[in-house]
Image (cartoon, helix red, strand yellow):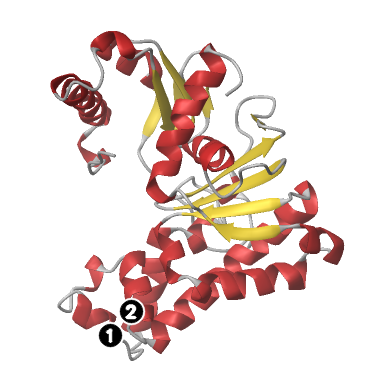
């Protein structure tokens, strides 16, 4: 799998050009190595954050990227010369786990993606549930504290404002500025602005108790939101993905405990909470499945 930094601050066109360049590079490499010729490529599956309109292939809004009413599907499809299909990135990741990952053979699956934001996808009997206007699954923007932290979406107290990657880093820095003892400053040569959620996970592995406290608090916030979803949706499985899951039991232990504390017992007992099997490839595999379902039918 190829990957490149998004660098969204330089503009949407730059991001599209990067995506197109990677697609064309994969196609060239396949032809050069004799694996596939151009006729073997039938289309493009895309996953994007934010509320979107699947019928027009338009990204309506992405709080973390700054896109509004952006025709992503058609821009990429026309640039590459292939038909394209678009879905929410968390929907794609959840579909990927259902097809080839941790949720194979499971009927009711909720996917939770922890990254720059927090996304969610709901798959029922092999089909993504999109809701009345393609916005189902935006679990990062459920309110867990009505007077809490400001979120990038403009609301206050969103789950994303507490448990996303940048939020984890921000909360870690707040404690360090209050003189908490930790390995984290040494990991970034004293530049606290460079601290990321990945650093927090690495510090936990190195035995840093302060970093473990930050992750436990993150798990409690996340568990509050997940318990709401368990009660509302009664899923059979929740698949959690994203770099934060590298914290392992330091995340999943307190997360499961919080869900058991807050959710109805009968719903919590029926739901397995597991890490992704596909990791960073879940969204890519799910995007391919998205195209297949839209253009070719059931997988």
Q: State the image coordinates of residue 282 (x, y, percent, origin top left).
A: 45, 42
Compared across the picture, whether 79 is left or right of 276 comes to: left
Which image quarter is the C terminus in?
Answer: top right
- Residue at image point 28% right, 69% down: 195
Quarter of image, res 268: bottom right
Quarter of image, res 124: top right
Q: Secondary structure at mark 2?
A: helix
- Sort mark 1 into few (<14), some (14-19) or many (20+) by Cα contacts within 10 Å: some
- Residue at image point 33% right, 15% down: 41
Q: Secondary structure at mark 1?
A: loop
Is 152 above or below relative to 89? Answer: below
Residue linked to disc 1: 183
| Identity of the residue furthest to the front in this view | 34
Q: State the image coordinates of residue 231 (x, y, percent, origin top left).
A: 79, 55
195 or 151, nearer to the observer? 195
- Sort mark 2 into few (<14), some (14-19) or many (20+) by Cα contacts within 10 Å: many
Q: Residues at badges 2 and 1 in contact (C-beta under 8 Å)?
A: yes
252 or 171, nearer to the observer? 252
Residue linked to disc 2: 203
Q: Is residue 183 visible?
A: yes
246 or 261, nearer to the observer? 246
Label 2, label 1: how far apart the Cα atoms are: 6 Å
């Amino acid at each position: 799998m190829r990957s490149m930094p998004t660098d969204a601050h330089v503009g949407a066109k730059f991001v599209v050009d990067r995506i197109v360049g990677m697609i064309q590079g994969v196609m060239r490499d396949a032809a050069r190595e004799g694996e596939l010729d151009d006729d073997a490529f039938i289309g493009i599956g895309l996953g994007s954050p934010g509320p979107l309109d699947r019928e027009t292939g338009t990204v309506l809004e992405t709080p973390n990227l700054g896109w509004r009413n952006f025709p992503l599907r058609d821009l990429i499809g026309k640039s590459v010369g292939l038909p394209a299909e678009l879905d929410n990135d968390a929907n794609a990741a959840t579909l990927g786990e259902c097809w080839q990952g941790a949720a194979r053979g499971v009927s009711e699956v909720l996917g939770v993606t922890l990254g720059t934001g927090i996304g969610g996808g709901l798959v029922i009997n092999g089909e993504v549930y999109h809701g009345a206007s393609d916005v189902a699954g935006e679990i990062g923007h459920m309110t867990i504290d009505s007077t809490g932290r400001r979120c990038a979406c403009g609301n206050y107290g969103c789950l994303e404002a507490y448990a996303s990657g940048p939020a984890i880093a921000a909360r870690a820095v707040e404690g360090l500025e209050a003189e908490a003892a930790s390995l984290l400053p040494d990991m970034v040569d004293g530049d606290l602005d460079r601290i990321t959620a990945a650093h927090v996970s690495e510090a936990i592995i190195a035995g840093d108790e302060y970093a473990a406290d930050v992750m436990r608090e993150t798990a409690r916030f996340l568990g509050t939101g997940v318990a709401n979803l368990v009660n509302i949706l009664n899923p059979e499985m929740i698949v959690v993905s994203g770099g934060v899951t590298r914290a392992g039991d330091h995340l999943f232990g307190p997360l499961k405990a919080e869900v058991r504390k807050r959710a109805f017992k009968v719903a919590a007992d029926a739901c397995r909470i597991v890490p992704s099997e596909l990791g960073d490839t879940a969204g890519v595999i799910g995007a391919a499945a998205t195209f297949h379902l839209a253009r070719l039918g059931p997988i």
